[in-house]
Amino acid sequence: MSKGGFVYMMTNSHHTTIYVGVTSDLSSRVIEHREKHYPKSFTSKYNCAKLVYFQFFNSIESAIEEEKRLKRWFKKTET
């Protein structure tokens, strides 16, 4: 049985940068972002520590599909 997963978005304090991610443990992952657990990561570099959106999916595969869809949409709107 699949554990499920979350798609989430983080931003910086000025709301100028958005990060889209997927995880099975949202609270732990947000703490990692806020504490800059991975200092060379995108969220650490751009100070994305504010959770602004999340959605739960019954399967991690569905969450990953939604993450990819959102990333394509954001990439499309950048141009």
Image: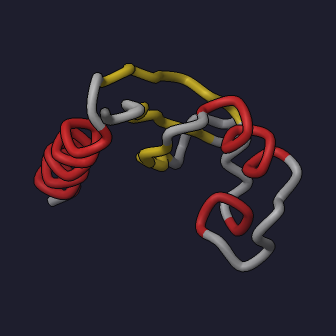
Work out whether 65 lies above or below 44.
above
In the picture provided, is 74 more to the left or to the right than 50? Answer: left
What percent of the width, then of the height, locates residue 66? 20, 38
Q: Which color scheme does this rendered protein use?
A: secondary structure
In the picture provided, is 66 more to the left or to the right than 60? Answer: left
Could you say which quadrant of the image residue 30 lies in?
top right
Q: Residue at x 46, y 34 (%)?
A: 8
In the picture provided, is 60 more to the left or to the right than 33? Answer: left
Work out whether 42 lies above or below 72.
below
Which residue is situated farthest in the bottom direction here?
40
Q: Residue at x 14, y 54 (%)?
A: 72
The mark tally for this picture is: 0
What percent of the width, then of the height, locates residue 27? 70, 30
Name the one closer to the observer, 1 or 8. Answer: 1
Q: Residue at x 44, y 48 (%)?
A: 21
Could you say which quadrant of the image residue 34 lies in?
top right
Q: Residue at x 72, y 79 (%)?
A: 40
Quadrant of the rendering where the N terminus is positioned:
top left
Quadrant of the rendering where the C terminus is positioned:
bottom left
Could you say which quadrant of the image residue 3 lies in?
top left
Name the one closer to the observer, 51 or 6. Answer: 6
What percent of the width, then of the height, locates residue 16? 54, 44
Which residue is situated farthest in the right direction here?
35
